[in-house]
């Protein structure tokens, strides 16, 4: 029997800092309802969905706590959980997490169709800087506001579909998809915020959308998984972020992509078994991978000298 999942990416247009969390949650519920009306079973929301992308701004200690969630669901977010449960729809949601021992993470959760949190992820690859770089169009202070994730790359059961999670910059790192695919992931879900300007990031404007989609497509194809990516997009307090929320098949082909940069839902019927022929042929990991030759990937962090290779020309 075909294993189909009605999969939605819910792109969220810019959230100005003046917008309250209940106002944002009302927008998310409208997107959820639109997705459900098209039959969606799982709705993917962006990274840091509940607020403006606050890491663009330097705040002094004590001035940024309002951006963080101390529990999940809390009173602001509970209406989203309740509406999703009523509709029998699950979701992925990114948010800023403050733990009971005062640790801060860039976090996502996976919620099943019954409203239960069945998976949690804390962002591993934190881009940007921790120091105050005044005078720039905007900063990128994820290294100031968040600790590196400590939960690893988990794969979680969503009503029979094996789902891995990551967040934004993680999508550019092949190790992420491979770590998830090695655990049997069939679908990778992620949220993102990709600003036009990131200090120290040299990339032509036209390349931003290309490298975003390239990362999703390469990750999907090389790991025989579906990838569903939802962005927070458009202008926030005058700062622009790319759109391009998309669903990609294990072939690497884009099945659907948001057309604009505002609130928009894209729904796709994902035949989850589409990954199987790839997993059983070109990407049959057990048959073809060479972990004995990949040690350098786990041992070395940055680029360095070549490793010695012993060879005789005619042997
Ligand atoms: N939020 C986030 O991780 N954004 C980054 C900005 C670029 S860092 C070079 C991204 O990868 O889209």
Image: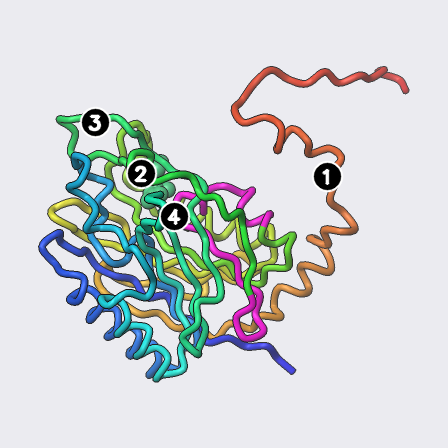
Q: Nearer the viewer, residue 217 or 7?
A: 7
Q: Ligand 1 near label 4 (Cβ, under 8 Å)?
A: yes
| Residue 206 rendering spot, x and y as whole percentages | 30, 42
Q: CA distance from mark 4 to mark 2?
A: 12 Å
Q: Which residues are magenta?
A: 157-179
Q: CA distance from mark 3 to mark 4?
A: 22 Å
Q: Nearer the viewer, residue 26 or 144?
A: 144
Return the residue at label 1. Answer: 291
- Which quadrant would the N terminus be assigned to in this image? bottom right
CB within 8 Å, label 4 to label 2: no
> What residue sits 89% from the left and 17% below the top?
314
Is 307 positioned to the left or the right of 206 in the image?
A: right
| Residue 99 rendering spot, x and y as whole percentages | 35, 50
* Element carrying mark 3: loop
Return the residue at label 3. Answer: 132
| Residue 246 rendering spot, x and y as whole percentages | 39, 60
* Element carrying mark 2: helix
First in sequence: mark 2 vs mark 1: 2
Return the residue at label 4. Answer: 168
* Element carrying mark 4: helix
């Amino acid at each position: 029997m075909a294993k189909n999942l009605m999969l939605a990416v819910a792109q969220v247009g810019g959230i100005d800092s003046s917008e309250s969390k209940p106002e944002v949650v009302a927008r998310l519920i409208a997107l959820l309802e639109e997705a459900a009306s098209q039959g969606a079973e799982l709705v993917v929301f962006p990274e840091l969905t509940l607020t403006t992308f606050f890491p663009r701004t330097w705040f002094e200690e004590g001035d940024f706590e309002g951006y963080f969630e101390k529990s999940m669901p809390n009173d602001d977010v509970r209406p989203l959980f309740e509406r999703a449960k009523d509709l029998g729809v699950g979701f992925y949601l990114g948010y800023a997490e403050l733990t009971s021992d005062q640790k801060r993470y860039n976090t996502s959760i996976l919620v099943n169709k019954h409203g239960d949190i069945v998976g949690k992820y804390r962002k591993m690859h934190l881009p940007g800087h921790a120091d105050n770089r005044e005078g720039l169009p905007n900063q990128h202070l994820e290294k100031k506001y968040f600790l590196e994730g400590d939960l690893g790359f988990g794969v979680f059961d969503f009503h029979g579909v094996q789902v891995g999670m990551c967040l934004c910059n993680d999508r550019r790192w092949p190790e992420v998809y491979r770590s998830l695919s090695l655990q049997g992931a069939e679908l990778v879900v992620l949220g993102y915020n990709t600003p036009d300007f990131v200090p120290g990031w040299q990339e032509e404007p036209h390349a931003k959308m290309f490298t975003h989609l390239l990362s999703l497509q390469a990750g999907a194809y090389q790991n025989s998984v579906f990838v569903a990516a939802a962005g927070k997009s458009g202008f926030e307090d005058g700062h622009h972020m790319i759109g391009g929320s998309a669903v990609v098949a294990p072939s690497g082909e884009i099945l659907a992509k948001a057309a604009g940069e505002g609130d928009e839902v894209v729904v796709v019927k994902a035949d989850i078994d589409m990954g199987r022929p790839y997993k059983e042929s070109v990407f049959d990991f057990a048959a073809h991978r060479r972990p004995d030759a990949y040690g350098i990937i786990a041992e070395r962090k940055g680029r360095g000298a070549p490793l010695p290779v012993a060879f005789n020309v005619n042997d």
